[in-house]
Image (tube, helix red, strand yellow):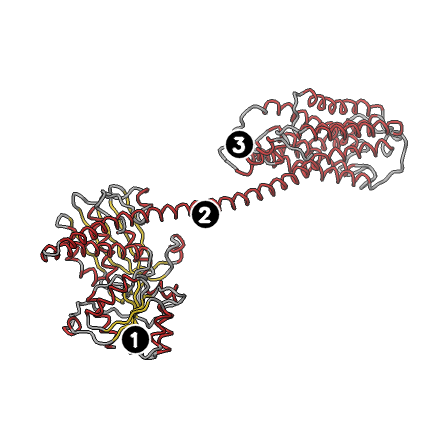
Amino acid sequence: MRGRSADFAANLDGCMTGNVNDRRPLKASNTALAIVPAPIEEQRWALAICIALFGGFCALIPFARVPLPRVEAFIPIYDSALALNNLVTAGLLLVGFSRSRLRAVLVLASGYLFTALMALPHMATFPGLFSASGLLGGGPQTSAWLDALRHGGFPLFVIGYALLKRREAESVRSRMDTGGHVVLATAGAVAVVFVLTLIVTAGHQLLPRIVGDDGYATAMMAVSVPVWLFSLVALAIFLGSRPPYSILDLWLMVVLCAWVFGIALSTVINAGPFDIGFYAGRLYDLFAASVVPIVFLVEASQLYGRLDEARAIAEQRNVELARSREELAQAQRLEAIGQLTGGVAHDFNNLLTVVIGNLELISRARGDPEKIDHLAESAMKAARRGEHLVRQLLTYARRQINHPQTVNLNQLITNIENLMHRVIGEQIEIVSLLSPILAPVQIDPAQFETAILNLAINSRDAMAAGGRITIETRNVTIDRQHAANDPEITPGPYVMVPVSDSGAGMTPAVLARAFDPFFTTKETGKGSGLGLSQVYGFAKTAGGCVNIYSEPGIGTTVKLYLPQSSNRPILLEPVAETASLQSASGQGTILVVEDDEDVLAVTAESLRELGYEVVTATDAAQALEILRGGQPIDLLFSDVIIPGGTNGAQLAVTARRVRPALTVLLTSGYTAAALSLEHGLPDNLNVVGKPYQRDELAKKLRLAIGG
């Protein structure tokens, strides 16, 4: 019975999906028995079993009247096994009815329940088993009549199943109270058994005598033949129905064949109780009661096998799905890189066009100092725009030089309010709602101010007809439950800075890409697409996160979450540069280590103009060779990323072993945090961010050498 049609697989799939709106019959294994056509291989098995049953029946006919010893234990064993098998079958069919809503299955389940329950009074009233005349107040004929009623009642239920199933096969079954129907069917079967038992016990004297002193009486034939014919009629109805037969129909025909042969051997052909026909007929009954449970077990084992196969397929599909998601993520990363590269190339081409064009004009304007100054200023302006663009990219990538300080955000927002008013314009109102008990945070103040300005500019661009920008500050605590909804944030205390506007809002598609670099909805030339990217990068660098809430036509709120700090905040006020720091000439010798020759040349020339003696090296080996010589060196000024297998941080450590009193100043375009992770940068080394201005470099050098 291992073969199955595609319909059975579809039934199994339907059962696994469990669609409650599907009005087709549910297709669990016990339901599919009554619906799915039996495969050819299974039909061959059923035919072979029927032939074997018929062969055994024919072989037993000549010996049916041969008496055998009376085995007292046979009847309780027979009735107990019959009751147990039929009770299990009834339970399985009732479950099938609750799944399929086929009333025919309910009728058949009632038949099996009736047969199981009839075994109890039959066993109790059998003469000589519990008492000489049996229990329940019956007589010597009671158990025989109960046996006859049991053999005749079951095929009637099967006939009802077959006729009702024909009518239900093509109809759509409505939703019903299956539990109520099961209770009614069970109560009905119990009531029928009770009434029949009452009739054959209390009224046993009114019934014809079918068991004599030496065997069956003549009336037994008049009772047994109609009972036997009921089983033949039920079998004929199945055989006369239009193929294909369902699995349950097929094996019910096997059950009826065994039932017919059992009745013939035990009550028609034999002479009386405890002859070969009596024993053989009841063995046929036990076989008939065992067929459907065995089929259920086989179907269940096959169902488990299919479930294992389905689980294996599901696991394989999950692996393929995970691989597909990874491939999709990789494709999206490549797309983002391509978009990023294209945006950087576009903006830098514009900047380089300005720089190169002005430098070419300067080279041809040697006799016009005023024009040269104007062109140089234009080139410097474009170069500074390029510097700003690079800083935005590094902030987004969390690789910008970071100068964290413990500050109160209220002070920073107050300091830049005038600047925001100048940038935003008078048509937009700026409202600040600042918490008076705000906790300090440790951030880079300049990056925070840039982030707030970027958010304000985005809000301004979303409110062409004017509106309001609201900036708030408040202390919040993110618990584990809220953190579980956002994998980018960890539980703990934060300072939240919401920046809200009453602008046009974002569509879901725009909102999903708001933080993507170079993604912008503004007109060409009116936005770089890096404003929100910078905000995102700043928040992540500070150890926090940023969320956007937006609805089209209502407005947008961007919430910055920055971790609270336990340190005391410092007051941020402009520090006047001392005249000596700005104008005094530098003194001492500086060893510059830089692998880019153009950068090395510009840096060396700038240092010489500042008054320093300059020694240059292009890698760590050359620098160490100079340090091991006798030339005096006051400061090592090295790029972090240099060739030769030794980075600037490692060079600084080795250089201080050679000259313990040597002052070291490093330069790089990466953040100190990124350098610490990737290049082993110690915490006690100072880093100057690239590109650096001449005055900034002079200040750093004088502070380093002076310290």
Distance from label 1 to label 2 (Cα)? Answer: 48 Å
- Of the residues tagged 3 and 1, which is closer to the observer? 1
Q: Give amino acid for label 2.
A: Glu
User: In which quadrant of the rendered view does residue 185 lie?
Assistant: top right
The disc placed on residue 326 is: 2
Q: Mark 2 falls on what kind of element?
A: helix
State the image coordinates of residue 479 (x, y, percent, origin top left): 37, 58
Asked if one can make out residue 251 in the rendered structure from this viewpoint, the answer is no
Q: Give amino acid for label 1.
A: Thr
Q: Is 168 situated above or below 413?
A: above
In this rendered view, identify the residue nearer to me: 211 or 529: 529
Residue where numbered disc 1 is placed: 663
Q: Is 475 situated above or below 341?
A: below
User: In which quadrant of the rendered view does residue 267 lie?
Assistant: top right
Q: Mark 1 falls on what kind of element?
A: strand
Please tell me which of labels 3 and 1 falls first in the chain. Answer: 3
Residue where numbered disc 3 is placed: 176
Task: Count residues near mark 2 (Cα–Cα under 10 Å), then give few for <14, some for 14-19, many for 20+.
Answer: few
Please tell me which of labels 1 and 2 falls first in the chain. Answer: 2
In this rendered view, identify the residue nearer to me: 645 or 698: 645
